[in-house]
Amino acid sequence: MGFFSKVKDILNKNKNKEDLTIEKQTEVESYDKGLEKTRKEFVSKLSILGIKFNKVSDEYFDELEELLINADLGVNTVLNFMDRLRKRVKQENITDTKYLNEVIVDELFIVYVNGESLSDKINLQDKGPTVILMVGVNGVGKTTTIAKLAYKYQNEGKKVMLIGADTFRAGAVTQLNEWADRLGCLFLGSDEKDPASVVYDGLVKAKNEKVDIVFIDTAGRLQNKVNLMNELEKINKVIGMHVDGAPHETLLVIDASTGQNGISQAKAFKKITNITGIVLTKLDGTAKGGIVLAIKEEVNIPVKFIGLGEKMEDLKTFDIENYIYGLFKDLIYYNELFEIYSELLTEKEKETFKGYYFEDLSLSEIAENKDISRAAVSKMVKNVVDKLKYYESIIHKYEIMQIISRSTSLNDIEKIKDNLNNIINL
């Protein structure tokens, strides 16, 4: 059904690794790992919400709304989303909360795309240097982001140059110069000249050296909007004089962990200059990954890159499908895991899990059939989910060992299960 089916397809391909290129597999796994905190905080609570409420109700919607706001989707985004969701529930006469989870995934995807063809691609030029202006307040990781972008494009065979025009922050030019030395790319910067003059000299050098991509670091003194706006206007004018149609991108760097403050920064910078895309850093360090959707809804600027770790290669081109997969894969994972590891569960655990997830029995119905309390059934379902995830984590570690040793087949599932039983019985 819609996008949720795509998530299932990604999951199945990820499990059958022969269908994925190494690059694509790495991308999917990066999103999986990088969004783990958000997934554990948000999706686990969403699953519990489905257990708590048998049917869709006003109380369910109230708790879902609070859950979405806590995930940092933003109040306006959540209110608009809830209106859409309520309308769809009414139109399709949806009552089952587990089925509604699929609808939620579809609707969140629609929130981001909203009928538009959004490009996460950088506007690279065939002739002459591609000029990319980097903006953002101090402390968001702008300089490190520039270095990671330079690393990415150098690995793709591009000749890269960095221009240090942040003459406001002490040490900014020196820091960027150190990154340039470390990466082995061209650099020009000065904290003693006017920023526009630095950009002028840098672009002259870039054209003489036949550079493919130029990254320009700028000051982030948002507290003084007038001076910053004047400075950026002057820089943009100089860039346009040297390179037709430049800057080709103006990327705003935002720290994902700042939540709604990051949205405020995006709104403020949008008023000052023409932002073409957002780089969202430190997404792996926060449980509020919903900011991706909030940014698109609130300021209508596409996220072009996201930071999913500290390594140079952890800055990834944003992919909405991988993002939604990374957030919601656990919603469809449990049924898959049950089929693989059910023989490791007790009969009572199997019957309870099958009743709830496969036969669509309510917790109350299962409790009545087994003559136990509803709370006991709820606890058992949660325990089975935890067990399945634990078994899968052991399998993943085992597969890694197999890849390293290359001694036996990865498909030797019986041996893996024996090992699992030995570990469990320790």
Image (cartoon, rainbow, N blue to C red):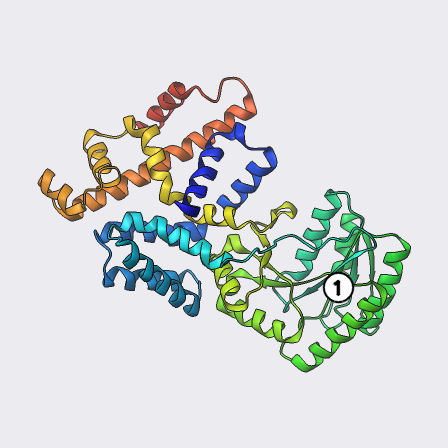
- The image shows residue 282, relative to residue 347, as above or below, that is below
Horizontal arrangement in the rendering, residue 173 relative to residue 55 (left or right):
right
Horizontal and vertical percent for residue 3? Answer: 44, 47
Q: Residue at x 26, y 54 (%)?
A: 93
Quarter of the figure that contains the N terminus: top left
Residue at far bottom of view: 226
At mark 1, the secondary structure is loop
Horizontal and vertical percent for residue 285? Answer: 51, 54
Horizontal arrangement in the rendering, residue 248 relative to residue 42 (left or right):
right
Horizontal and vertical percent for residue 99? Answer: 30, 47
- Residue 60: image quadrant is bottom left
Q: 223 or 66, which is in the foreground?
A: 66
Quarter of the figure that contains the C terminus: top left
Q: Which residue is drawn at 31% across and 40% down?
A: 385
- The image shows residue 127, relative to residue 351, as above or below, that is below
- The image shows residue 166, relative to residue 50, as above or below, that is below
Q: 236 or 367, which is in the foreground?
A: 236
Horizontal arrangement in the rendering, residue 29 relative to residue 163 (left or right):
left
Residue 34 can be seen in this image? no
Q: Which residue is drawn at 24% across and 42% down?
A: 381
Q: How crowded is mark 1: few (under 14 residues within 10 Å), some or many (20 or more)?
A: many
Residue 133 can be seen in this image? yes
Q: Which amino acid does label 1 sit on?
A: Pro
Q: 197 or 292, which is in the foreground?
A: 292
Residue at far right of view: 208
User: What residue is shown with label 1?
Assistant: 247
- The image shows residue 72, relative to residue 99, as above or below, that is below
Badge count: 1
Horizontal and vertical percent for residue 312? Answer: 65, 47
Residue at far top of view: 408
